[in-house]
Amino acid sequence: MNSEKLSGESRKKIAFLALSFFFVFGFSNVSYFLPVYYSQIGMKSGDASGWLVAAFYIMSVISRPFLANIVENWGFKRVFIVAGVLSVLSSAGVLLSGIHFWPGFLSRALLGVASSIFLIGLATYQAVAFDEEERGRAFSLIMAGGLAPMMTIVPFADWLLLHQHNGLYILMPLLVCLGAAIITPSIPVIESV
């Protein structure tokens, strides 16, 4: 086992990536409670709320093959800026759509595309940002950031809905997307892919 310490530059990249994955997985994870939220604000159809949750994941999967060369064509900074803008706009659309299905569906679908752009950019950055001898340690620390929303954002979202704080709950994805939009373009610069 290589016991050498990670370089200062690598630690900086790890911190930025862990925080970036925290925000990106955070806005995905908080949506687990959307059916509860929609029920509490008066959406009568369980099918409709299910489709609103699914729209994100469907578009996240469908869009990825079409986004395969996005980092090579745009570079990391532009990828993260575009993903950030799309995620903030689409999460604002979810917030404003209330129980109206089609605006909510389109906003959730766009948020799925934004998530794909973020994840393609972050995964590509992660793959090229570290020397081979640092890669395993870096990846394990970075993924801790991606899992952290399950221990922080998700329980808080559950608590908000349990106490009928619906307005604060539906504001959470916008705030988390805003965090992703702010932090990801600040990732330390590396050579192009």
Image (tube, grey):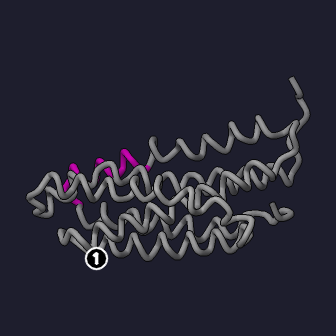
Quadrant for residue 69, please give it.
bottom right
Q: Is residue 83 above or below residue 121?
A: below
Side of 34 where 172 appears, left or right: right
Tell whether position 164 is magenta: yes
Q: Main secondary structure of the magenta part?
A: helix
* Range of magenta residues: 153-165
Vertical relation: 19 (above or below) 42? above
Residue under label 1: 96
Please tell me which residue is depicted at 24% across the width and 71% down the height of the picture. 102
Question: Is residue 12 shown above or below 101?
Answer: above
Left or right side of 33 for 61: right
Q: Residue at x 21, y 68 (%)?
A: 101
Residue 61 magenta-highlighted: no
Of 25 and 78, nearer the camera is 78
Residue type beneath disc 1: Leu
Quadrant for the C terminus in the image: bottom right
Q: The N terminus lies in which quarter of the figure?
A: top right
Helix, strand or loop under label 1: helix
For the point 75% across and 48% down, which residue is it? 127
Q: Residue furthest top?
A: 1
User: Mark 1: few, some, or many residues within 10 Å (few <14, many ≥20)?
Assistant: some
Residue 164, position in %: x, y? 19, 57
75 and 81: which one is in front?
Answer: 75
Residue 15 locus on image (x, y percent): 70, 52
Front-lying residue, 132 or 110 = 110
Q: Nearer the viewer, residue 104 or 11?
A: 104
